[in-house]
């Protein structure tokens, strides 16, 4: 994974897309910054955070992912692999369906994914520092270089979705205490059923991760 580091950027996700548009895709690439001025969050919201937090976006070809991975659940997959890296470093972070990073009952980050033909763009933001009382922060100190190295090493292994899902399914019970947004409305996950393709069954409706 080639890594480009920036001191400041409007959005690592936007920068990466522009970079690929201008230079083409030849290898997996990651853009990393500790501050972004116009970050992209879920449902078009912003995720700017503050200087000193972690923002990175990377691009992969579909062939770089396991063949059993449902494309609509890529964000769950890449989020959970990072969660496992952080867990191995003694963090108590967990993933709220579908791809929000939580410490206890506070969101500390999230993932967005977009596709363009056979190219997958993934953007991840994590609060390493306090932002405001509505959000939490990572409960451990991390060496970003080492963490990203370990993370992309795991991505390159093409760990099967079946293996990731078996763990995520257990952790999904924590999500049931929360709500998610479906069709611009807050919906309780209390009675949601997690399907093997990463979607959920809620209110007699099958819902996939939309980001």
Image (cartoon, helix red, strand yellow):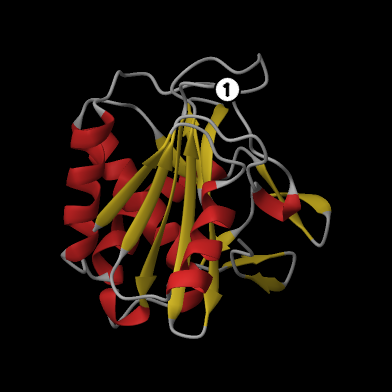
Residue 57 location, x and y as percent?
A: 44, 52
Query: Horizontally, is 180 left or right of 153 in the view?
Result: right
- Asked whether residue 160 appears in the rendered view, the answer is yes
Looking at the image, how many numbered discs can be counted on the residues? 1
Estimate the x, y position of residue 166 in percent, counting from the top left.
Answer: 30, 61
Label 1 crowd (10 A; few <14 / some 14-19 / many >=20): some
Locate the C terminus and report the quarter of the image it occupies: bottom right
Nearest to the observer: residue 148 or residue 158:
148
Instruction: Name the residue at 75% across, 64% down.
Output: 203
Between 6 and 87, the residue placed more toward the observer is: 6
What quarter of the picture does the N terminus occupy? bottom left
In the displayed structure, would residue 28 be above or below residue 127? below
Which residue corresponds to the image point at 52% horizontal and 22% vertical from the top-left?
51
Q: Which element type, helix, strand or loop, lies under badge 1?
A: loop
Residue 170: tell me if it is visible: no
Q: Relative to residue 171, is residue 18 drawn left or right? A: right
Q: Residue visible at 53% across and 64% down? A: 17
Residue at the image point whose x is 39% and y is 32% from the top: 93
Which of 183/147 is in front?
147
List x then y, in percent, for residue 2.
26, 56
Placement of 25 over or under 101, stated as above or below? below
Q: Which residue has dot 1 on it?
A: 50
- Judged from this view, the residue extending furthest toward the front is 22
Q: Is residue 134 left or right of residue 114?
A: right
Indicate whether 185 appears above or below 70. Answer: above
Residue 181: x %, y % from top left? 74, 52
């Amino acid at each position: 994974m080639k890594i480009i580091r920036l001191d400041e950027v409007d959005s690592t996700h936007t920068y990466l897309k522009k970079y690929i548009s201008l230079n083409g895709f030849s290898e997996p690439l990651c853009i990393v910054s500790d501050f972004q001025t116009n970050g992209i969050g879920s449902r078009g919201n912003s995720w700017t955070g503050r200087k000193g937090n972690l923002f990175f976006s990377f691009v992969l070809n579909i062939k770089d992912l396991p063949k059993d991975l449902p494309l609509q659940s890529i964000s769950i997959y890449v989020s959970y692999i990072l969660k496992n890296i952080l867990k191995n470093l003694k963090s108590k972070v967990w993933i709220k369906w579908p791809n929000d990073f939580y410490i206890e009952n506070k969101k500390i980050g999230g993932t967005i994914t977009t596709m363009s033909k056979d190219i997958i763009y993934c953007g991840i933001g994590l609060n390493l520092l306090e932002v405001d009382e509505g959000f939490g922060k990572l409960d451990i100190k991390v060496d970003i270089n080492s963490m990203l190295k370990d993370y992309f090493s795991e991505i390159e292994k093409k760990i099967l979705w079946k293996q990731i899902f078996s763990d995520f399914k257990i952790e999904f019970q924590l999500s049931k205490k929360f709500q998610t947004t479906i069709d611009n409305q807050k919906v309780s996950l209390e009675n949601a059923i997690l399907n093997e393709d990463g979607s959920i069954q809620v209110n007699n409706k099958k819902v996939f991760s939309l980001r």
